[in-house]
Image: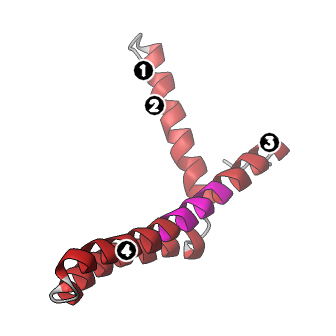
Amino acid sequence: MSHQMTEEEIYRIAQRKVEKKKAVQTHFIVYIILNMFLSLIWALPFGWQGFLFFHAILAGLWGIGVIAHFLIVYLSGDDIKWDREAVEREVERLRDRASEGKNL
């Protein structure tokens, strides 16, 4: 089932993509700031001994998450079709529930 997208649909899709990109940027900024803060918290009372291992694990695992978030948002394929199909499936499911008299 193919239909022409309205300007409102195009705008909502563009808005959603911008929100996802802003979320990645926020995730990265929080990652940098919090890792700097944790570095200072660890280094002040304990010195730098043992810091490398602790920080490498923390920053490394979280960094993998940041990279994955970036790849999903910026390098993923055309998710518009998948999003639309998912919305259409959900609409159908809700229509079926409503026709059966069930709570949505």
Which numbered mark, 3 or 4, is in the foreground of this view? 4
What kind of element bears circle 1?
helix
Q: Which mark is residue 74?
A: none
Residue interval drawn in magenta: 18-28
User: How far across and how far down the image is residue 2, in percent?
Assistant: 71, 50
Q: Residue 26, located in which quarter of the rendered image?
A: bottom right
Residue 23 colored in magenta in the image: yes
What kind of element bears circle 4?
helix
Q: Where 49 sits versus 75, above or below? A: below
Q: Spot the residue most to the top.
A: 101
Q: Is residue 65 left or right of residue 1?
A: left
- Mark 1 surroundings within 10 Å by alpha-carbon count, few (fewer than 14), some (14 through 19), many (20 or more): few
Residue named by callout 2: 93
Inspect the image, locate mark 2, and give the three-letter code of the amino acid beneath it. Arg
**First in sequence: mark 2 vs mark 3:** 3
Q: Residue 46, located in which quarter of the rendered image?
A: bottom left
Which numbered mark, 4 or 2, is in the foreground of this view? 4
